[in-house]
Image: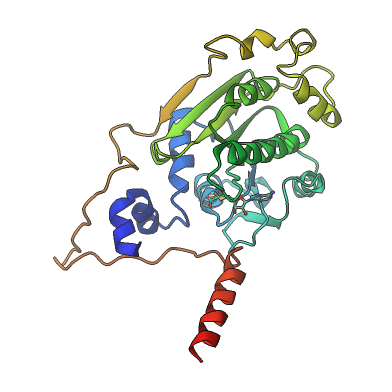
Amino acid sequence: MGKASRDKRDIYYRKAKEEGWRARSAFKLLQIDEEFNIFEGGVKRVVDLCAAPGSWSQVLSRQLYLPAKSSAESKEGDLPLIVAIDLQPMAPIEGVIQVQGDITNARTAEVVIRHFDGCKADLVVCDGAPDVTGLHDMDEFVQSQLILAGLTIVTHILKEGGKFIAKIFRGKDTSLLYCQLKLFFPTVTFAKPKSSRNSSIEAFAVCENYSPPEGFNPRDLHRLLEKVGSPSGGSDLDCSSGWLEGPNKVYIPFLACGDLTGYDSDRSYPLPKEADGSSYQSLDPIQPPIAPPYKRALELKKASAQSFNS
Ligand code: SAM
């Protein structure tokens, strides 16, 4: 699919380039914010897990760091701190500290804590996604492992009352995941931003007001999560095992978000004319990945084509 064709079929891809976002995902976070006001309440320390190529970090920089920087009252030490983590390197973004690392590694939380000088984060976002195989159960399982890695980091670095936003894949274990998140957050909503296609199984868990169980020790997280839905889980965890049973299982608050009269990500839109009446010039992506995992595959393909032609 060429750039112009994709511009027509994917309005958010086109808009992302026009507005200077590195990826169309930026609109997902913006639309979640429209509904949940995630930056309200003096958010100053934020962690962006699985951040590359960086459009969510750009949103964080534009919403939090840049306005504070340009405000006359802000002093250097008062500026918001944004730490972005990904396996992949990412081109720099103003006001964003980058850490190349694996969120499933326990040391990653320590690195973040060091950057925050021992203080805790107000908000953790995680748009992590594995390489999708197309086998839904498998993809959902791998995705849920990433969320659990995100939740592990959350239990070390999020302040009480803080928020956690995480990408999920809807599937047969959605109720279990909901129940697990509810152990730590009294309010959990699964949200589908308008910029996320209906055909995609992705949605976002918006978890508010972090309140770990009394006496909780992050080292016990996995033991605690394993108990959810198990026969003994209900009484031990104050998380009724009945939630996971019956024809309707758990009632999960599910919300479409973003301006519902706005652009529909599943529709094609005609390309606009340029101001001088000439036809639309497709824009280049704002920032292609600097070291994508498929780079080596492309190099091998090129080398094999060259040896075939010589
Ligand atoms: N939010 C990003 C944005 O707006 O540009 C897009 C994130 S992209 C959908 C998913 C990212 O998850 C990829 O960059 C991938 O490298 C990262 N990822 C997957 N597994 C990871 C892991 N274990 N640790 C760190 N990053 C991971």
Quadrant of the image for the N terminus? bottom left
Viewer-closest of 234 and 19: 234
Q: Position of residue 274 (x, y in %)?
A: 20, 64
State the residue in front, 248 or 236: 248
Residue most toward the bottom? 310
Residue 246 vertical position relative to residue 302 in the rendered view, above or below: above
Which residue corresponds to the image point at 70% horizontal and 12% vertical from the top-left? 239
**Residue 53 visible:** yes
Compared to residue 308, the image places residue 285 above or below, namely above
Residue 306 falls left or right of residue 261: right
Q: Residue furthest front?
A: 308
The answer to whether one can see residue 40 in this image is no
Asked which quadrant contains residue 261, the reply is top left
Please name whichever residue, 172 or 186, is drawn nearer the observer in this view of the structure.
Answer: 172
Q: Residue at x 80, y 16 (%)?
A: 214
Q: Position of residue 237 (x, y in %)?
A: 76, 13
For the point 64% across and 22% down, the residue is 176
Horizontal side of residue 174 vs 98, given as left or right: left
Q: How many marks overall?
A: 0
Q: Nearer the viewer, residue 150 or 276?
A: 150
**Could you tell me residue 247's position as x and y percent?**
53, 10
Q: In which quadrant of the rendered view does residue 187 lie?
A: top right
Residue at 50% from the left image edge and 45% from the top image edge: 63
